[in-house]
Structures are given as C-alpha cells and as structure tokens.
Amino acid sequence: MNRLVKNCLAMTNKQPIIQLLGLAQRARELTTGENLALKQIRQGKAKFVFIARDAGAASAKKLTDKCHFYHVPVSQSLTRQEISQAIGQTRTVVVVNQTGFAKKFQQLITNLNEGE
C-alpha cells in the first residue's frame, strides 16, 4: 500500500475521534492549553488527555508523566492540525472532563490502534 493511501485510511479512521472532539468542545467538556491541562490532571478532574503527536518533546514528556502518575489515560494519536481542526482553536493539549466522552474516546482510540 502506498503512503498516500495509508494516510487517507488513517484520516478516515480518525474522523469519528475528530468529530467527537468537536462535539465535546461544543458541550464545553474540554479544557485546552498546557497549564490548564496540568491543573486539571492534578485536581483529578481530567478523564482523558490528548497530546498532539507533533507537540514539543519537553511538554509532551511533562504531560505524559503527569498523566501516568495520576492514572489518567493519554493519547498521542492526533496531530496539532487535527486537534485544532476539531476544536476550532490552535492547541496541542486537550483534556476531556466528562467520563462519558472519555470512555468513548478510549474505545475509538482502541479501534484505531487495532486497525493499524
């Protein structure tokens, strides 16, 4: 399979995640930005965290370590562009604050990883 076809397949597989992220944003169940994300994680309010695959190494490590310490599921399956497209803001970190959305994101990420 050539690279273009793989990219198109990956994009269509990510589409439900991107759409649900947009829905969660409209429902005001997301927190964006690194500092606010760290605060939500520390306070135990974060249910799921998206870190852009192309985020800075130091920021990604800090957030990933914090998520592991506080037992918050984390995903780096989306790029900055995909996250920004979904929520309408240029961001590299998005925290999901609602349990229902978090469970659905985990399910979609698992399906995405099994499909690769």
Image: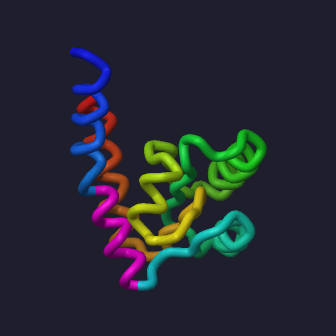
Task: Give above or below for 76 relative to 102.
Answer: above
Task: Name the image colouring.
Answer: rainbow
Q: Main secondary structure of the magenta part?
A: helix
Which quarter of the figure is the N terminus placed in?
Answer: top left
Residue at image point 29% right, 42% down: 11
Q: Residue furthest top?
A: 1
Q: Is residue 38 left or right of residue 116?
A: right
Res 53 quadrant in image = top right
Residue at image point 45% right, 47% down: 78
Task: Give above or below for 5 relative to 44.
Answer: above
Task: Give above or below for 95 relative to 107.
Answer: below
Which quarter of the figure is the C terminus placed in?
Answer: top left
Residue at image point 24% right, 56% down: 16
Residue 35 image offset from top left, x and y in percent? 74, 68
Q: Between 105 and 87, which is closer to the camera in this rendering?
A: 87
Q: Residue furthest front?
A: 4
Q: Between 67 and 12, which is closer to the camera in this rendering?
A: 12
Res 10 quadrant in image = top left
Magenta-drawn stretch contains 19: yes
Magenta-drawn stretch contains 61: no
Q: Number of callouts in the render?
A: 0
The magenta region covers: 17-27
Residue 12 image offset from top left, x and y in percent? 22, 44
Residue 97 image offset from top left, x and y in percent? 49, 75
Residue 72 image offset from top left, x and y in percent? 56, 57
Task: Give above or below for 34 relative to 15.
Answer: below
